[in-house]
Amino acid sequence: MDGAPAEIWLKLENLQPIGSFKIRGAGNAVLSAAPEEVARGLVTTSTGNMAQGVAWMARKLGVPATIVAPHNAAATKLAAVERLGGQVVRLSWDEWWAAMEAGRVEGVDGLFIHPVQDDAVIAGNGTAGLELVEDLDEFDAVLIPWGGGGLSTGIASAVKALRPDVRVYVCEPETGAPVTAAMANGRTPTKIDYTVSFIDGAGSGALLPKMWELAEPLLTDAFAISLEDAAAAVRTLVERARVVGEGAAGLAVAAALSGRVEAERVVCIVSGGNIDAGRLATILEGGVPD
């Protein structure tokens, strides 16, 4: 982008069949499972993108899919799940996060695909990192939105294995930035406040212990991004690159445009493009969605 503090490259995961990187992890997890497990149906907890990945795989394989979503999940994403034939169950944020931590949903039958810490999901996400190394002869840093850590861990594991000098930064909304807080606390997780926002694919009030253990050695640092800057980055993507990205995708671009990373070539992971039309309209008009 002209005038940017570095040469910025975009990894367009919004062009995946479901509009998000989540098809990578969902596909790998489902296809790696035993057929008799898959035949019981698929279950996941998701704010919307993993929900679509699991529902897409369920439709492809002819099995039912049950999606447990928090109350702030984007209507656009859940409508897409239902079009794919998935059944949506809504919970409060606290109930939903408890299911995430537990790795199961009480009373719901089927093969549970954890949206973040399933090893096969992380490996599937890592294919995006392999593609970066294959497609770019060199880059100095990669910026990744952090939701639960599955994307960051997968990409960082692949990139670091092949190019250990590349720096990896994660980006979070300042309304829920547990990695940024941990980094400021000597890389030790600490309790933070969390406020839901239009950035439904990133941000939370806590770190999943397994994911922090895996990710921490791979990460250079973390950035907490304001909602205003994230919205401005989504608008910049549309206006200057003709790319529609959701709120989480705006985090990495906002960090790159801010000049916080000293580098010549930076890769931003545009994690998805599933944004409600109303939210996008507000952003394009210069505002920040509620």
Image (cartoon, rainbow, N blue to C red):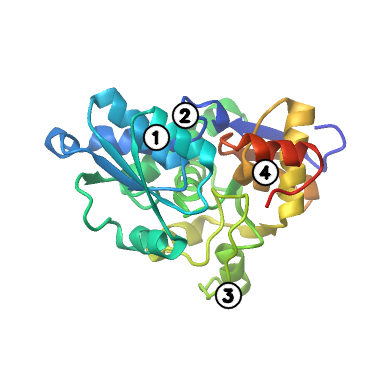
Front position in the image: 282 or 225 = 282
Name which residue type carries label 1.
Gly
Front position in the image: 44 or 218 = 44
Asked if one can make out residue 20 in the rendered structure from this viewpoint, the answer is: yes
Q: In the picture, which quadrant includes the N terminus? A: top right
- Looking at the image, do the residues carrying marks 2 and 3 touch, with CB atoms under 8 Å apart? no
Q: Eyeballing the image, is 259 above or below 138?
A: below
- Secondary structure, mark 4, is helix
- Give the residue at mark 2: 18
Q: Residue at x 23, y 25 (%)?
A: 62
Asked if one can make out residue 261 in the rendered structure from this viewpoint, the answer is: no
Classify residue 71 as left or right of residue 62. right
- Looking at the image, do the residues carrying marks 1 and 3 touch, with CB atoms under 8 Å apart? no
Q: Eyeballing the image, is 223 above or below 144?
A: below
Name which residue type carries label 4.
Gly
- Give the residue at mark 3: 186
- Secondary structure, mark 3, is loop
Classify residue 77 as left or right of residue 99. right
Q: Residue at x 63, y 44 (%)?
A: 247
Q: What is the C-alpha distance between the residues marked 1 and 3?
A: 35 Å
Mark closest to the chain's N terminus, 4 or 3: 3
Front position in the image: 77 or 134 = 77
* The quadrant where residue 35 appears: top left
Residue 250, which numbered label? 4
Please name which of the two marks, 4 or 3, marks the residue nearer to the observer.
4
- Looking at the image, do the residues carrying marks 2 and 4 touch, with CB atoms under 8 Å apart? no
> For the image shown, how many numbered marks are present on the structure?
4
- Looking at the image, do the residues carrying marks 1 and 2 touch, with CB atoms under 8 Å apart? yes
Residue 49 x, y percent position in the rendering = 47, 40
Q: Residue at x 45, y 45 (%)?
A: 154
